Amino acid sequence: MNELLIVQNITKRFGGLQANNNISFVVNKGEIIGLIGPNGAGKTTLFNCIACFYNVDEGKIFFKGSDISQSTPQRNCQLGIGRTFQIVRVFKDMTVLENIMIGAFLRNKHPRDAKRKAMDIAAIFGFAHKLQLKASSLTIAEQKRLEVARAVATDPELLLLDETMAGLNVQEVKESVELVLKLKERGITLILVEHVMEGIMSIADRVIVLDDGEKIAEGSPRDVINNDKVIQAYFGDKYHAKRREFTTSIQ
Ligand SMILES: Nc1ncnc2c1ncn2[C@@H]1O[C@H](COP(=O)(O)OP(=O)(O)OP(=O)(O)O)[C@@H](O)[C@H]1O
Ligand SMILES: [Mg+2]
């Protein structure tokens, strides 16, 4: 079975607001999916539904064939779904090593094993020489990387990264892209929410576009950037003037 995640006609409402409206898509094992859309489009809500921080009002979500629509974040993490948060949420008073160990404890009950696992992950993420530093002393870029490391330490099969490239400089975006490709090589399937187009378009196998709670496009990065509905959603009436600029920025 190649289908890892199946999202089937899901709707999530907050009072009268439909934050996700009848959204469907499939994620295959080993893919990198880019999830994009203007502010307020419903991207983080969709992550919260997949990770079961919210339960959907309608529709179903299947992960590895199991219906997780009404599951819990804990059960989902155990099943193999990892995530990061749009606003970075590391444990600031704990060290880098301790932060990663928290993730590692999910599948390593003995502290010695969790520590060994965390040190392996720390090396991959470039933290080998910062293990004993307090997370609060790291730069924002490092804290974001630490959050990804903590999620990877839970051994996810599917990893949901919410704007881990936001606010990073050009070099940091490049490093972040390389890291994502390393995670893919380790067999992790990824869904990335990003506004940083040059970060996502070069590595996404497929891109899904949300606007106003609805899925308006899905396809290869090239198809999506040439899609009229997508350009309209991003640029509205400035469509014609901005189109060339947009296309150039991601090449
Ligand atoms: N817990 C909540 N309660 C009420 N409304 C919410 C809640 N979470 C999100 N919303 C609303 O749902 C809509 C979608 O928000 P969401 O955070 O999913 O968008 P987004 O695509 O992640 O946006 P951004 O790019 O700014 O992060 C917005 O109108 C938002 O105000
Ligand atoms: Mg968001």
Image (cartoon, rainbow, N blue to C red):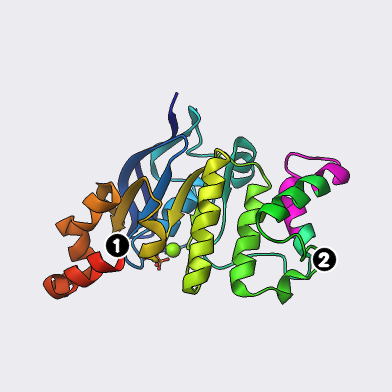
What mark, if any, has residue 251 been given in the picture? 1
Instruction: Look at 18% across and 64% down and name the residue there.
Output: 232
Name the amino acid type tagged 2. Gln
**Quarter of the rendered image showing ligand 1:** bottom left
- Crowding around mark 1 (Cα neighbors within 10 Å: few <14, some 14 to 19, many 20+) is few
Image marks 1 and 2: residues in contact by CB distance under 8 Å: no
The residue type indicated by label 1 comes to Gln
**Is residue 188 visible in the rendered structure shown here?**
no
Is residue 199 visible to the viewer in this orientation of the structure?
yes
Quadrant containing the N terminus is top left
The correct choice, above or below, for 98 with respect to 183 in the image is below
Q: Which residues are magenta?
A: 99-114
How many numbered discs, if any? 2
Q: Residue at x 48, y 27 (%)?
A: 65
Residue 200 in the image, given as x and y percentages of width and height: 40, 57
Front of the two marks 1 and 2: 1
Residue that mark 2 sits on: 132
- Residue at image x 54%, y 62%? 175
Can you give x and y, in whole percent of width and height, for residue 75 in the image?
62, 39
Which residue reaches farthest top?
1
* Residue 57 percent coordinates (x, y): 40, 45
Of 123 and 82, nearer the camera is 123
- Examine the structure image and report whether residue 100 is included in the region drawn in magenta: yes
